[in-house]
Each structure stands twice: as C-alpha cells, then as structure tokens.
Image (tube, helix red, strand yellow):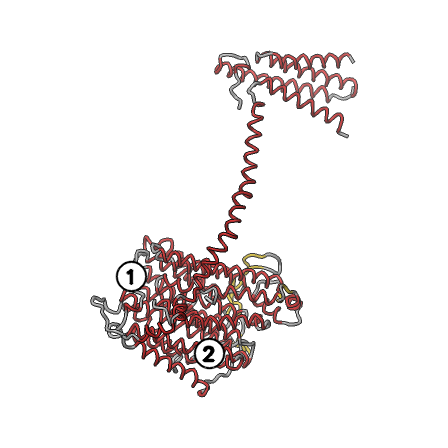
C-alpha cells in the first residue's frame, strides 16, 4: 500500500487560508485575499487529482476490487478501549470522487468570485468563510469515524450560516441564515440520536467497523439490533431512519426543505458552491457512505426512496411557478437531490442490483458540474441586470454570448439531452428505477419532463423573450467570471463520458453498464416535448403563460406559494409550539427554577439579618462565647465520648 | 488535693478578671493568672502520677515561654490601641461590629 499521507494537505490548506485571511485579512490582504484563497485551493485541487489518479489507476485495486484505505488516523477522544472519536482520512472510491467534485467546484467558485465580489467591503472575510467551508466539506467527506462526520457536518452548517448571512445588513439575509441554521440543526438532532443508537448497538463509532459488524447477519451486534424494537420498528430501522433525517435536513428533502430557497439570499457564487454542488449532497453522501448498513434494512431504504421521489416531484412542480431565478434553481437542486436519494433507496448491495447506487453517485457527480454552472451563469446574469426577477430580464443572448452558451449547455445537461452529462446519469437512474419499482419510475419520468420544462422556461425568459431594455451595461464581466463558466460548460459536456461504473459501485467491483437506445426513447422524447412547450410559451413575449396560469387557478396559486409549507411551519411554531409548549416552559423556568434559587438567597439574607447582633464588637462578649463553647465541648467530650 | 483547689481557684479568679475588667492591661494580667493555674496543674500531675518523668515540667517551661511572647504581642497591641483611641478601655474600641 503506497503512501497517501499527502492527502492530509488537501483539507489543511483551506484551513490555513481561513486562519490567515480570517485573522490578518482585513488589514493586510484587503485586495489580494481572492488570489491567496484561489491559489491555495488550486494546490488542493491539483493534489486531489493526483490522489484520484493514484487511487483509480495505480494502486487502489486489489484483485479487481477497489479497497478502502485508511490514510491517516488519530484517536482524538477515547471513551473506552472500543469506543473512541477518531480524526482520520479514508480513501475509497466515493471519497476520492467527492474530493474531485468539491475541490474543482470550489476552485471555480473562488475564481468566479474574484470578479463577482470585486470591491466588496468584506472581500477578505468572504474568502475566509469560503475557505472554512471548503475545509469542513473536505473533512466531512474524508471522515473515518461517524462522529467525525458529525463534527464536520456541524462545521459545514456553521459556515453555510455565515455565508448565507454574508450581507448581514439585509434583514431577509439574516432571517434566511437563521432559518437555514435552525432547520438543519433540528434535523441534526435526529442525526445525533441516530449516531448514538448505532454506536450503542454497534459498540463502536468507527464507520468501517460498524459496517463490518452490522452487515454480518450472524454477528451479536446485528442480532441485538434487529431484535430490539421500539414502537414496532427495530432499532436498526430507527437508527438508520434518524441518520437519514439528518441527511434529509442538509439535503433539503421534504419536509425539511424550507431553508434551501431562502438560503439564496447569500451571494450567488456561494449558492453555486454550497447550495448546489457540495453541502446539499452531503445527505446523499452520508447515505452512500453507510449504504452497506442501509442495504440490510429494507424499511429505512424505502423511507429514503419515497421521501426522495416525493421531494423530486414536489420541488419540480414548485419550480415551474417561481419567478426568482435563483429560487427556480434552488427547487431544481432539491428535485435533483431527490433523484439521487431515491436512486439510492431502490438500490441493493453489489452486482447488477447495485445499479441505483452507482447511478445516484454518478448523478451527484454530473449534477455538481452543471448545477454550479447554472448558478454561476445566473450569478453573471444577476451581476448584469442587478435583479433576481425573471421579468427584469430577457433578450440577454446578444449582450452576454458566453454566458448564454454556457447556460444553454447546462440546461441541456440537466434536461438530459444526449450527449450532455445529465443524460447519462439520468438514464442510469431511470434504468435502475424501471427494474425495481415501476411507480418510482413513473414519477421519475414525469419529473424529468417537468425539469426540462422549467429549465427551458428559465432559459427562454432570461435570454429570449422580449428585447433587452438595458441601456447602460458594463459588458459581460471580467475573464475571471467567464473562464469558470467555460471550464464548467466543458465539464457539463464531457463528464458524462467518464466510465463511472468502472470506478464507483456499491461493492467496489467494476459494473458493466450500457445505454439502451430503445429505453431512452421515452425520457428523451418527453423531454423534447417539454422543451418545445417551454419554447412555445416563453420564447416570444406573449400572454399565453398568464392565461394558462389563470386556467390552473388554485393549483397554480398553491404551487406558487410553495404549497404553503412555510405557512404550515409558521402556524405550527407560532400557534401551537410557542403558546402550548414554549410559554409553559418559560413560566416554569421563571417561577420554579429561578424561584427556588431566589428563595434560597432570600432565606439566607433574612437569617443573617436576624443574627447579626451577635457580632457586637465587644471583646468581653466574644470571650463569653468562647468559654461557653469550651464548656459545651467539654460536656460533650466528658459525657458522650465513649 | 489542696493543690488542685489552689489551681482551680486561680483559674476562676483569672476568668472573673477577664470578664469584669475593662482595662486591657488588667485583662492581660487575668489571662496570665489562668495560664499559671494550668502550669500548677501540670506540675502537680507530673509529680503525683509520673514522678520519674519530666514531661509536665517541660510543658510548663514551654507555656512560660509562650506566655512571655504573648505578653509582648499583647502589649504592642495595647500601645497601638492607645495611639489611635487615646485610651486602653475595651469599651471604647468597639467599631469592629456589624
């Protein structure tokens, strides 16, 4: 086994950048912060590519199976000889794949921000936060210990909070940051309980050991965990479902998705990095990391499947009605992550049955590129027109040719038109769904059509529709903004051709996959129909869309208002939790807990007031007490000391 | 044991003096009386209970030495008290109270 310890540098370089920029940035690196951040991340990216080359092509394989390699491990906190929290680095196909995704998307975002955030007051702070986020995400994907995952999971949440609230003078940004933090924190409670359940029954927190113990049907841990039950479900189901709830919170699955659209208040490159490509897929990554355990428990896998499929469909419907371009993209992200989730849910471990697993991670991989491209493109558009609303745009294709082409490529990729990246991964997902669950297949097919409809609605509204009314514009932006768009567009075309199934499968063995042309007719045909409908409705400015919206009436209104989920949450918190739980607890805290302490204090004060006369200042009184005391003590000693 | 009666009488005379006198020098003298009554006790018990040992006698010597040191400290305190209050009456120095 060769040496992988240089991988330690990949997360540590961004951490170093964060410390340097965070402490000295505002004073010394006010204008150069961007270059420092990008340069250190470039080094990380290069190292990740070297690691990927070494792992996938040189020495990762042993007898045709990709190995799990622990490159580094340090016991950070040890509870007992068996249970400890370790900090370490695991090298296996999915973590190496995620390394590539996170570092390269983050690098693109760093470079793009050079132009986009130019002249901001807190430029250095922005780059410090970006580096912190990159560090935590890299730490998360390289974790060997489930508690290490949890620590970095929270760090990722905290840096996301900082970046969403970057424009902290805007009340909406502050509210969005708080909402994102609280909702994901709430989900993380489930995650923590899940970890504790798995750790308790598995007897360890180490991921590799947990998988080993809980996948052997003969092991004592597995038998204990499946026979112990609570409320009719086994502890294995409980533990895994709770962990999935944590993942669902970060990955914005229904009903914990409400924070993601609001998180778009952050700077657009941040949305591209955190809320499109990396942090939101952490939930998918988590389920994939623990997939061998999930595959032992069909009921929690079916929870994953149905929540994923429902979220995919639900978000796609909402995305068709939104008018803020970043919100459309946010719902589209949620929908695509739903795809990845249900693909994991329908998968099984190993061989042909494990197609869903491979398809899910393939989609994660391609989605990261085209979705961050969409966000960066949207960022360029917003930079140009200074608005997020579709109605302020239109006819931009002549003003921003490069952005136009890149955006078009990304739309084709997400819609799944061959030969763009999304086609391949989506085909794999649909194939996997077709072979295991026809209902899910139907939902997925319809969602795919909806996806292409709303993406092209967005595309036509931005770049076609009416003639542009912009008078004064400052060109398309600097090269630092155009270059990432071009690179990501090239990726969106090319990454679909990566023979993904050779590298990443549920059991490490290469899997033969092929694209069946006859099978592709249904999804591609539906997609083309959806695109032509979008073109008919939105290519030229006309009033058919609004008429159509009026025809759908209530349905349209409901989708436009995001099916009132936010209102439901507000109703539950403000009308039920606050008056019926919050206020009684506040009363108890004020009157019972505080009251007891006040009572102690007041009693002491009263007693001391009563007896303070004893301290009279007269020496003879004190002598009297002294001799009295001696007398009492001597009586005690003489008569009761036996 | 008439000698114990003497020492007990001496002790209570000292105690009475300590309680009733307001003059600090007299109070000091009363304390010395009490210490000496204890000395007499030590010598008496040593003589009648352990005639071949000298423990009680040595203890007495120690008490005399400490009493001398204590008298020096007490007189220093009295002098300081006199400087600040121009009196050595304990009733006049009762500021240290609640």
* Residue at image point 30% right, 66% down: A382
Q: Is residue A42 left or right of residue A639?
A: left
Tell whether B27 sits left or right of A270.
right
**Disc 1 sits on a residue from what chain?**
A
Up/down of A417 relative to A277, above or below:
below
Q: Quick one: A397 or B66, which is closer to the camera? A: A397
The residue carrying mark 1 is A118
Work out whether residue A109 or residue A287 is closer to the camera in this orientation and state it. A287
Structural crowding at the residue carrying mark 1, measured as other residues with C-alpha within 10 Å and reported as few (<14), some (14–19) or many (≥20):
few
Q: Position of residue A598 (x, y in %)?
A: 54, 38
Query: Could you tell me if residue A540 is visible in this image?
Result: yes
Instruction: Place residue A20 in its image quadrant.
Output: bottom left
Which disc, if any, is residue B21?
none
Q: Picture coordinates of residue A611 (x, y %)? A: 58, 26
Which picture quadrant has residue A537? bottom left
Q: Secondary structure at mark 2?
A: helix
* Mark drawn on residue A500: 2
Would you say A213 lies left or right of A572 here?
right
Residue A392: x and y, percent?
Answer: 28, 67
Residue A469 placed where, x, y %?
Answer: 22, 69
**Residue at the bottom extreme, as displayed:** A518
Which type of secondary structure does the marked residue at label 1 adopt? loop
Give the side of residue A424 with respect to residue B48, left or right.
left
The one nearer the camera, B31 or A632, is A632
Splitting the image into 4 quarters, where does residue A391 fall?
A: bottom left
Label whose residue precedes the other's in the sequence (2 or 1): 1
Tell me the CA gap for discs 2 and 1.
38 Å
Position above or below: A197 against A511: above
- Report the chain holding disc 2: A
């Amino acid at each position: 086994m060769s040496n992988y310890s240089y991988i330690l540098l990949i997360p540590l370089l961004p951490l170093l950048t964060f410390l340097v920029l965070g402490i000295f940035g505002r004073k010394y690196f006010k204008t150069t912060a961007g270059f420092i951040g990008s340069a250190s991340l470039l080094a990380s990216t290069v190292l990740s590519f070297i690691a990927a080359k070494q792992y996938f092509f040189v020495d990762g394989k042993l007898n045709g199976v990709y190995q799990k390699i622990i490159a580094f491990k340090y016991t950070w906190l040890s509870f007992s000889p068996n249970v400890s929290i370790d900090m370490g680095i695991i090298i296996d196909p999915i973590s190496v794949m995620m390394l590539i995704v996170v570092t390269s998307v983050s690098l693109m975002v760093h470079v793009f921000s050079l132009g986009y955030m130019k002249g901001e007051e807190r430029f250095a702070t922005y780059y410090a936060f970006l580096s912190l986020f990159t560090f935590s995400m890299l730490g998360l994907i390289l974790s060997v210990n489930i508690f290490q995952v949890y620590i970095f999971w929270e760090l990722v949440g905290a840096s996301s909070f900082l970046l969403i609230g970057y424009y902290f003078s805007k009340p909406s940004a502050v509210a969005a940051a708080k909402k994102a933090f609280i909702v994901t924190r709430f989900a993380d409670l489930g995650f923590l309980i899940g970890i504790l359940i798995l750790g308790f029954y598995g007897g360890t927190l180490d991921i590799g050991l947990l998988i080993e113990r809980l996948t052997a049907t003969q092991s004592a841990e597995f038998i204990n965990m499946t026979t112990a039950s609570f409320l009719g479900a086994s502890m294995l189901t409980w533990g895994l479902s709770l962990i999935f709830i944590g993942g669902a919170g970060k990955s914005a699955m229904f009903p914990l998705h409400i924070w993601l659209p609001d998180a778009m208040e952050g700077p657009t490159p941040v949305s591209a990095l955190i809320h499109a490509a990396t942090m939101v897929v952490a939930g998918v990554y988590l389920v994939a990391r623990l997939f061998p355990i999930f595959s032992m428990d069909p009921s929690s896998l079916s929870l994953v499947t149905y929540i994923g499929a429902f979220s995919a469909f639900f978000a796609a419907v909402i995305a068709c009605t939104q008018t803020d371009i970043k919100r459309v993209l946010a719902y589209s992200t949620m929908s695509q992550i739903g795809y990845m989730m249900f693909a994991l849910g329908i998968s099984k471990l190993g061989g042909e049955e494990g197609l869903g697993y491979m398809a899910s991670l393939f989609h994660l991989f391609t989605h990261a590129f085209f979705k961050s491209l969409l966000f960066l493109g949207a960022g360029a558009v917003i930079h140009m027109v200074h608005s997020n609303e579709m109605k302020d745009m239109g006819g931009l294709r002549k003003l921003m040719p490069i952005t136009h082409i890149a955006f078009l490529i990304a739309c084709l990729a997400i819609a799944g038109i061959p030969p763009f990246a999304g086609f391949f991964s989506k085909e794999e997902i649909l194939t996997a769904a077709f072979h295991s669950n026809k209902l899910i297949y139907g939902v997925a097919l319809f969602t795919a059509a909806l996806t292409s409809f709303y993406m092209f609605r967005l595309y036509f509204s931005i770049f076609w529709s009416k003639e542009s009314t912009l008078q004064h514009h400052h060109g398309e932006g600097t090269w630092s903004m155009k270059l990432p768009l071009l690179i990501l567009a090239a990726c969106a075309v090319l990454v679909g051709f990566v023979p993904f199934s050779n590298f990443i499968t549920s059991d490490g063995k290469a899997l033969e996959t092929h694209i069946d042309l006859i099978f592709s007719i249904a999804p591609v045909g539906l997609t083309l129909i959806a695109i032509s409908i979008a073109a008919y409705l939105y290519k030229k400015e006309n009033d058919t869309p609004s008429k159509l919206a009026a025809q759908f009436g209530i349905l349209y209104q409901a989708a436009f208002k995001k099916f009132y989920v936010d209102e439901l949450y507000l109703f539950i918190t403000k009308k039920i939790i606050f008056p019926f739980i919050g206020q009684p607890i506040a009363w108890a805290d004020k009157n019972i807990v505080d009251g007891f302490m006040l009572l102690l204090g007041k009693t002491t004060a009263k007693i001391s007031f009563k007896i303070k006369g004893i301290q009279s200042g007269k020496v003879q009184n004190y002598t009297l007490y002294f001799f009295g005391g001696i007398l009492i003590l001597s009586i005690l000693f003489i008569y009761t000391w036996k | 044991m008439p000698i114990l009666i003497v020492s007990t009488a001496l002790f209570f005379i000292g105690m009475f003096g300590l309680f009733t006198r307001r003059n600090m020098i007299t109070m000091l003298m009363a304390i010395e009386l009490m210490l000496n009554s204890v000395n007499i006790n030590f010598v008496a018990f040593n003589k009648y209970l352990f005639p071949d040992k000298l423990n009680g006698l040595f203890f007495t010597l120690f008490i005399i030495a400490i009493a001398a040191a204590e008298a020096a400290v007490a007189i220093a305190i009295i002098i300081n008290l006199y400087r600040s209050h121009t009196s050595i009456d304990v009733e006049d120095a009762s500021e240290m109270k609640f």
